[in-house]
Every structure is written in C-alpha cells, then in structure tokens.
C-alpha cells in the first residue's frame, strides 16, 4: 500500500506527517529545526527522498537544508570545509549564500524597487520563501526569495546562482506586499522544460520560454483597482498563488489579492472566475490531481481581516474550472474560527480519491481523503503553518 | 585557547555542545575569532556576519567580561581575559520577542 507523506513548515520548525493510503491514521514526526522558521520544505519529483528545506531566522539568516533519506537526517549542503575553500585556501562562502547577480558578464544592475510608501529602496536578500525542485533532476532546484528574485542550484543546493533577467521586467516598479517583497510561486511546465512561471507579491506573474534567461510580465486582464494607480498596469499586481494541472500546461489558475483568475493561454490573458464565492480574497489555490477542471480555494474576509467570513472555515471547490463554487464544510469548524491559510499551505496528493490538505495559522493541519467532501484534523496544535506539501510513496 | 559561547540555535546548527574552543594565531580580535569559528564550523557562515558585507547581523550581539563589544571595530583586540581563555566571548541573539 502507498504511503502519504506531508511536509509541513511552521513558524517554529518542520514536521513530517505520514499515513498509509487510507489516510486515516497519521504519525507526526518533528519538530525538525526547532525554533526556526521553515518557510517551505518539499521533495524532488525525480527522487522523493531528496528533500529541500528553507530554514530561516530573523536573528541568524538563511540556511538551506537537504535530506537524502526522506527526512530522517538533514544536512546543510555545501558546508563541509572542502566545499567552502577556494584553491588558495581562503573561504569561498557560497553555501547558503544568495547573491544577486549584478556582474557585468551575466548579471543585471542591482537597482532599487518601490517601498510601501512609493519611495525607492535597494534590493536586499532576506530569506527563501519557496523551493521548487526540477521535475527531472534531483540536484536542480529553484528558490524564490525576498527581496524578490529567482535563484537556481544545479549541485543539490551547495551553490546558488540568480536568474537575473527576471529583475529586468520593470523591477523598479515592484513593491512589497504585507509579507514582504517575495517571489513565492514557481511553476515548471512538464511539457516544455524551457518554460517557467513565477509570481511576485506585489509585482505580478512572469514567464520565461528560454529556461530563465529572459522573462516577460503576463498580467493582461488583472485588475487592481484599490492597490495601483493604474488598475490595469503591466506590473505591480499582488498575485498570491498560481496553480497548474500538469496535463494542461496552458491553463493556469490564480488566487490574486482580490479575485480568482484563470488563463487558457499560458498567461497571455486572464479572466475572472470568482463567480459565487462569498469573497474572492485568499491566498492558496490548488488543482485536483486527476480532474484538471476541479480547483480549490479558501476565501478569507478581506485584505485587513485575514480570517474566514462569519467565523466559518470553508474550502470552496469548483468542478467547472471556476465561476460555480460549492462550500466544503464537513469536518471543518463552522463557528468561532479566525485562522488564515497561507499561500503555500495547501496541497493535493496523487491517490485516487485525491487527497487535499491544508494548514492554518492556528496550527491545525486538515486532511480530506475524498477530494474535499469531508475533512479531519491530523494535528491541531502545531505552530502557525507556513507550508504543506504532499508526497505519495509507493 | 579562545572560548566562544554560541546561542542555542547556532550550537544546534553547528552540532556542538557547550563552548567552542579555538586556537588563534596573531592578534585576538572579533574578526580573527569569527574567522576561526567559521573555518571550524563552516555552516555558521552567514549566521553571525552577513555573507557579503561581513558586517554583524542586526540581531546579533557580542559580549565579554561584562562589556558590550557589539559596536567595537572588528579589528579591536578583545579583552585580555578572552585572549587568555579565562573568559568566553559570548555571541548572543538580541533579546526580542516578548
């Protein structure tokens, strides 16, 4: 029987939750890296026991952790002395270092971006928000960072190089969202290895068709009426999350700051599919593993009240690719619930029936083994959950 | 022998218990001690000083002999008691959070 493994990042460490294919009983492992913020941990599609984790701290900075045995043991890649010494014996210090590429040879000048008040501020690395392993090579992994930029490692996380062309897309107009100016979404296209999507709060969505060398904004159709002086601006939109079903790489679903959006042409244009949602503000969006027109969101009240409307925690499912939504409530608290679900904290597994999972800022991780029809909490009292990823091991 | 006391999170990261003992050749300064510390425990690079600027991270403090050395020049000699190993250099996470 298959094993399901959930990788859960929280404000105070990482947890690994495991169950068999019935997904009834769960073992809870951890905390790993106790006391540190684990913005994201995830596994390689090419080798599910290769895990990467972003361990970060306002005190001590950024550490990348790697496991080669499914989370039993971890190490910070590239921190052996031989990894760090140059030929002359002096430290190179490349491990865990995310240095924006402003070099004359390959880089882009590191200029400034907008601050909250519209003034310009210099780019400054703060942390890794999201890790996206290659679909085919366990040693290749992308990292989305704050201040927003995209990095890639091709040596299993020992060294990182920026893909600086992204910052060329009107980087001076990018600005931070409430959580900071972060690149939080990286979507790889299984049908076209040269195509990558990324999203930045608050700048918008971007696409490369040449493996990350050049990028362009793909925000036509997005409207930010109260956030931008020009609601239809080319960049500046606060995109919260993008999801794709691997069988339909031209179809993208987006949870924006406000509005749930859809593109049928690889991001060339977007149209709204919020339909009958009680509010179209939210953070995560996910696609059913086997039904590419079935999508999930978790609406929250608004941009200043980050909790579910009416104190009722409701996942909304559309089986029609948007517009028509049904509330999924069985097993979820329907009174006095004031948690949030962050953008990386929802995932699906590939079993049949599709499992759906999400973690809350209240420390609960909920699981549905029937595509959302009913829910049960796996754990109730973790630290605030930042990310949830699901793996199926055969 | 120079003694260095790390905050708990960095002891875990470096996989050490208790103080770190370092041999320093030449002047004993914040810079030379941190260089030796990072040489011995490379996973600490970037956690005490910024990777690029080599400046102290904002939420890190350096104490020794009941003095705050956080704002001393990195090349200022440390107190004699630290240089002799009688007192440790304390690397401290700034008090914050409640």
Image: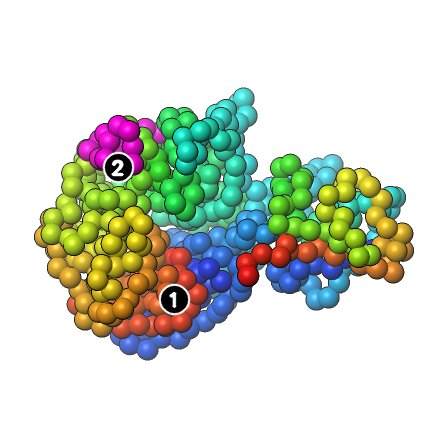
Sequence-first tag of 2 and 1: 2
Highlighted range, magenta: A214-232
Image coordinates for residue B35, horizontal then vertical, percent: 74, 45
Discs 2, 1: same chain: yes
- At x 47%, y 47%, the residue is A128
Q: Is residue A272 magenta?
A: no
User: Callout 1: few (<14), some (14-19), or many (20+) C-alpha neighbours within 10 Å?
Assistant: some
Q: Quadrant of residue A209?
A: top left
- Tell me the chain of label 2: A
Q: Residue furthest top?
A: A104
Label number found at residue A226:
2
In the foreground, A48 or B33: B33
Q: Eyeballing the image, is A236 above or below A278?
A: above
- At x 64%, y 63%, the residue is B8
Dominant secondary structure, magenta: loop
Looking at the rendered image, the quarter that the C terminus of chain A falls into is bottom left
Say whether residue A249 is visible.
yes
Looking at the rendered image, the quarter that the N terminus of chain A falls into is bottom left
State which mark lies toward you, 2 or 1: 2
Label number found at residue A363:
1
In the foreground, A173 or A97: A173
Question: Tag 1, which secondary structure?
Answer: loop
Q: Quadrant of residue A213?
A: top left
Say whether residue A214 is visible.
no
Image coordinates for residue A355, horizontal then vertical, percent: 25, 65
- At x 17%, y 58%, the residue is A317
| Colouring method of the image | rainbow
């Amino acid at each position: 029987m298959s094993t399901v493994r959930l990788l859960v990042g929280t404000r105070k460490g990482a947890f690994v939750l495991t169950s068999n294919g019935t997904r009834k009983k769960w073992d809870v492992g951890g905390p790993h890296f106790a006391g540190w913020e684990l913005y994201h941990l995830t596994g390689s599609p090419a080798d599910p026991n290769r895990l990467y984790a972003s361990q970060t701290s306002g005190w001590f900075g950024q550490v990348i952790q790697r496991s080669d045995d499914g989370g039993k043991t971890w190490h910070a890649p590239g921190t052996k002395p031989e990894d760090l010494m140059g030929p002359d014996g002096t430290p190179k210090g490349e491990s865990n270092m995310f240095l924006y590429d402003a070099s004359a040879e390959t880089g882009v000048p590191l200029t400034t971006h907008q601050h909250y008040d519209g003034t310009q501020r210099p780019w400054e690395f703060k942390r890794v928000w999201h890790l996206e392993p290659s679909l085919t090579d366990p040693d290749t992994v992308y990292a989305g960072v704050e201040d927003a930029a995209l990095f890639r490692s091709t040596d299993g996380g020992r060294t990182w190089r920026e893909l600086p062309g992204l910052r060329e897309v009107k980087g001076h107009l990018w600005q931070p969202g409430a959580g900071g100016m972060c690149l939080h979404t990286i979507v790889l296209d299984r049908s076209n290895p040269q195509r990558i999507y990324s999203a930045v709060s608050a700048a918008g969505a971007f696409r490369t068709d040449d493996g990350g060398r050049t990028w362009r904004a793909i925000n036509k159709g997005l409207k930010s009426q109260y956030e931008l002086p020009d609601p239809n601006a080319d960049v500046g939109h606060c995109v919260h999350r993008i999801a794709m079903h691997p069988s339909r790489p031209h179809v993208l679903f987006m949870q924006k700051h406000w509005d749930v959006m859809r593109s049928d042409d690889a991001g060339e244009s977007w149209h709204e599919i919020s339909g009958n949602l009680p509010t179209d503000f939210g953070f995560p969006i996910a696609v059913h593993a086997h039904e590419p027109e079935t999508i999930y969101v978790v609406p929250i009240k608004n941009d200043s009240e980050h909790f579910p409307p009416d104190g009722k925690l409701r996942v909304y499912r559309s089986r029609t690719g948007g517009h028509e939504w049904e509330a999924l409530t069985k097993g979820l608290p329907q009174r006095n619930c004031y948690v949030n679900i962050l953008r990386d904290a929802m995932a699906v597994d590939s079993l049949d029936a599709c499992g759906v999972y999400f973690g809350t800022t209240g420390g609960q991780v909920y699981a549905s083994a029937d595509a959302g029809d009913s829910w049960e909490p796996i754990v109730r009292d973790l630290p605030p959950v930042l990310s949830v990823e699901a793996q199926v091991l055969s | 022998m120079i003694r260095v006391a790390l905050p708990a999170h960095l002891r875990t990261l470096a996989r050490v218990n208790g103080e770190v003992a370092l041999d320093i050749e030449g002047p004993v300064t914040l810079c030379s001690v941190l260089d030796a510390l990072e040489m011995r425990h490379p996973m600490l690079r970037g956690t005490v000083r910024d990777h690029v600027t080599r400046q102290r991270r904002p939420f890190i403090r350096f104490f020794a002999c009941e003095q705050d050395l956080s704002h001393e020049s990195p090349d200022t000699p440390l107190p004699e008691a630290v240089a002799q190993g009688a007192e440790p250099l304390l690397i401290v996470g700034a008090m914050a959070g409640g």
